[in-house]
Image: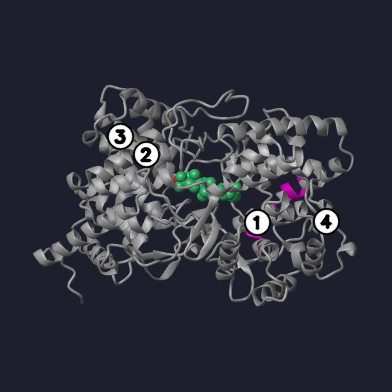
Amino acid sequence: MRNMAPDTSPGARRTVDSALSAAIAHLWKLQSPEGSFKGDYGGPLFMLPMYVGTAHAVGLEFDAATREGMVRYLKGVQNKDGGFGLHVEASSYVFTSTLCYVALRLLGVSAEDPAATSARQWIRAHGGALTSAPWGKFFLSVLRLYEYEGLDPLLPELWLLPESLPLHPSHFWCHCRMVYLPMSWLYGKKARIPDSPLLQELRRELYTTPYEQIDWPAQRTRVSPADAQVPRSVLILAANHLMGLYESQASRRLRERALYFVLDHIRQEDENTRYICIGPVNKLLHLLVWHFERPGGAEERAHLAQLPEYLWKGPDGVKMNGYNSSELWDTAFAVQAVVASGHIQENLPFLRSAFDFIDRNQVLEDTPNAERYYRHRSKGGWPFSTRDHGWPISDCTAEGLKAALALEPFVDSPLSQERLTDAVDLMLSMQNEDGGWATYELTRGPKWLELLNPSDCFSDIMIDPSYVECSSSCMQALARFRERFPGVRAKEIDAAMKRGARFVEKAQRPDGSWEGSWGICFTYGAWFGIWGLVAAGYSPSHPAIQRACDFLLSKQNPDGSWGETPESCRQRRYVQAEQGQAVMTSWAVLALSKAGRRDTPEVQRALGFLVERQRPDGSYPEEHIAGLFNKTCAIHYDHYLDVFPLWALSPVR
Ligand code: LAN
């Protein structure tokens, strides 16, 4: 048996302490001049090819270095079988294989290039582009590489339905709503780019039958098993059939009215976000919309000006980031980690500059005509990236508030009580009836709307339900605020905390775990679950917390580490990585430490793993991807390795 007693000898302590100092020194080297942390936010493999396709559609040429960087990136993420995954660690999908193939060809790679040849072989062996998940077929239609009759209808008229119907898009999760908004405009117009010799070649390359002979309507229900992550329900099959009938005799006047309505909402989103848009996909689709609606006009030019915001140049090439940045989120965590380390005085200039970033990026007002454009209020919130982006998120608001409060004693002009209270009011306004918090808005639609998920490859995109992560962050922030301002919103906060705790307890599985939705997966969930309950006043001896610790300990590797893969989220059960991961180990350490187990041999062993893993310069070697969305798509958070081990090594209690 190994000696499990905690090693608290002076030598061992120094190791943790020196690792901590090295991690802090390394972190500040990455701070941007604005005080924030900006990083690579790649991972999904449908974004860059959509970017390239959009650029081609609007006639935007890349300089040689960018083009070469994109090709290098795409070739680097190609799977051994020739295809491309939904994300960098996934098996090949027809959706992303087709789009990446098209992107390579549009970027000037010849059809005979080995990367193109193997991708084409994989695509053709899987039925060609005809079996791609619908977003791929949609994009190909705009590029004239697929026919609109081969798509299930994306009716702009849905927006004209009575708003009281759950089917009205205003009830959808904002990301879903804002992607299908411009899609419905482009579909309603059957917009597509002019033909060209290259497109003719691509139409031959992507299909196993001659393009002219394809029975397009018959392709609507076809999807490769490689792409079909979410089986189509009877409800969506029926809905698509009905919408197909409608589309064949749609009234032109109604279509015009619907398109007018949709375009107005597109314009409002552009203005609210300074042409950044809520996410990467609707950003590209809006650019396409304006390109077709008013070629060369002011809107298209404004969109083009913000387009490079989404590009990331890394050592592996040029990719599209999954958001305009993850700056606020990363900066808020970095601040909290360093404050938890206790190394505050010697790091004041860095912390102050991070504080200024947080200060400058709080959203100070609601969007104009919020109700009309189905927007929740915004005042007081923090977004995931920057104020310009403008969409506050419950947990980003919470983490922004926590960071601002943590720095309050150390800055010259802390945030006013009024601004802090605005953040609290926003969080209170976002608590759902079930006691939990969703991402950007209140839950607006019933659960059964998920049966209408038309994407095949993303799960849980239709509504914005309560999540353990968002709920925990909000509860932690409310608890911190209550400590600081005991008399302010006291009754409301007390009630919110009780309801929040009930939600978090209910979300816990019988085995003591929480399923994470935005990080991988159960270690991420455990961190939020335990921290949320402790914020609500649960003691470490509470059975829910004990169960959570037991679950974590049952998954610890012999070397003290934890490690999961994206399969944990997709399969919704703990899937061990082949070796320990520093980020997941850190989440587990943070969870167990908050549960009063810092001094146990298990946690000490985990700290030993983190110390061992660290490079002499305080950084950590690359490891598995750790972020995720919609159960199936992983996304890379560049600074998680710089922040979470640092936080875990800190004497947090
Ligand atoms: C994000 C990024 C941030 C993330 C957190 C704040 C970390 C999370 O706690 C709440 C959800 C949120 C805001 C989130 C939701 C889904 C996003 C927007 C993304 C993962 C970034 C990209 C992704 C978006 C949906 C990608 C486009 C694809 C669709 C299926 C619409």
User: Eyeballing the image, is 558 above or below 332?
Assistant: below
Instruction: Tell me the crowding category of disc 2: few under 14, some 14 to 19, or many 20 or more residues within 10 angstroms, Cα based.
Output: many
Give the amino acid type for the residue marked by disc 3 in the picture: Ala
Does the magenta-highlighted stretch encompass residue 235? yes
Circle 3 residue: 479
**Disc 1 secondary structure class:** helix
* Marking on residue 357: 2
Give the amino acid type for the residue marked by disc 1 in the picture: Val
Mark 1–mark 4 distance (CA, rounded to whole Å): 17 Å
Mark 2 touches mark 1? (CB < 8 Å): no
Give the amino acid type for the residue marked by disc 2 in the picture: Phe
**First in sequence: mark 2 vs mark 1:** 1
Q: Position of residue 389 (x, y in %)?
A: 51, 38
Does the magenta-highlighted stretch encompass residue 569? no
**First in sequence: mark 1 vs mark 4:** 1
The quarter of the picture where the N terminus appears is: bottom left
Part of the protein shown in magenta: 227-239
Q: Position of residue 262 (x, y in %)?
A: 71, 33
Circle 4 residue: 195
Mark 4–mark 3 distance (CA, rounded to whole Å): 59 Å
Q: Is mark 1 within 8 Å of ligand 1?
A: no
Number of dots carrying numbers:
4
Circle 1 residue: 52
Mark 4 touches mark 3? (CB < 8 Å): no
